[in-house]
Structures are given as structure tokens and as C-alpha cells.
Image: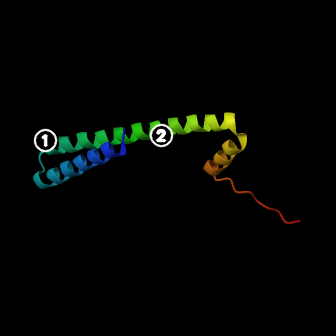
């Protein structure tokens, strides 16, 4: 899902929330809940797709250049090397 579509969904959710706050009707509450679920699902889908692309990229880096692969893994892990002075 594209960023533009997610922004549009968030805008619709915000509008639904404002409408519900003003009217406090059950119908508007249900509309807001529906929009909220749509936004959650869109974020999940986007995040899943992003991780899939990242996995493919890492897999490709491993095949092409081992050093880039391990550099990226260490960055993700937050690897901090402890230096011991002798």
C-alpha cells in the first residue's frame, strides 16, 4: 500500500472521529471503528511488505557481498564492540 493511500485512510479516520465526538451516535462510532481497523490493517500490510523487501535485499547482499550483509545485521542488532585496553 502506498504512503498516499495510508495518509488518506488516516484522514478519513480522523474525520470519522471528529464526527463521532460531535454527534455521539452509535452509527458514527461504528464508522470510526471501521476506519480505525482499516488503518491498522493498512499499516500491518505495509510493514509486512517492507520486511519482506528487506529480507530479499539482505538475502541478495549475502549472496553478493558478505561484508555488507554482516554490517547490516550488526546495525540492526545494535552491536557495540567492547574494547579492552591492555
Give the camera-side residue of 26 and 41.
41
Decide: few, some or many residues near mark 2? Use Cα within 10 Å; few <14, some 14-19, many ≥20. Answer: few
Sequence order check: which comes first, mark 1 or mark 2? 1
Q: Position of residue 53 (x, y in %)?
A: 51, 37
Left or right: 82 as drawn, with respect to 79:
right
Q: How is the image coloured?
A: rainbow
Image quadrant in which you'd find residue 60: top right
**Could you say which disc has been placed on residue 50 in the image?**
2
Mark 1 touches mark 2? (CB < 8 Å): no
Which of discs 1 and 2 lies nearer the camera? The answer is 2
Does 10 sit above or below residue 45? below
**Could you say which disc has been placed on residue 11 in the image?**
none
Please give the residue where the numbered disc 1 appears in the rendered image: 27
Left or right: 85 as drawn, with respect to 39:
right
Q: What residue appears at the point 76 percent right and 59 percent down from the top-left corner?
A: 82
Residue ranking furthest to the bottom: 85
Q: What residue appears at the point 72 percent right and 44 percent down from the top-left corner?
A: 67
Q: Position of residue 14 (x, y in %)?
A: 23, 51
Give the camera-side residue of 35 and 22.
35
Which image quarter is the N terminus in?
top left
Which image quarter is the C terminus in?
bottom right
Decide: few, some or many residues near mark 1? Use Cα within 10 Å; few <14, some 14-19, many ≥20. Answer: few
Q: What residue appears at the point 85 percent right and 66 percent down from the top-left corner?
A: 85
Mark 2, secondary structure of its residue: helix
Query: Marks 1 and 2, Cα distance to the nearest angstrom?
Result: 35 Å
Amino acid at each position: 500500500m502506498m504512503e498516499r493511500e495510508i495518509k488518506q485512510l488516516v484522514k478519513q479516520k480522523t474525520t470519522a472521529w471528529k464526527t463521532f465526538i460531535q454527534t455521539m451516535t452509535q452509527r458514527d462510532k461504528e464508522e470510526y471503528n471501521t476506519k480505525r481497523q482499516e488503518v491498522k490493517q493498512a499499516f500491518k500490510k505495509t510493514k509486512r511488505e517492507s520486511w519482506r523487501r528487506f529480507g530479499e535485499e539482505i538475502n541478495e547482499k549475502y549472496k553478493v557481498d558478505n561484508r555488507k550483509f554482516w554490517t547490516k545485521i550488526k546495525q540492526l542488532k545494535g552491536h557495540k564492540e567492547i574494547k579492552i585496553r591492555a
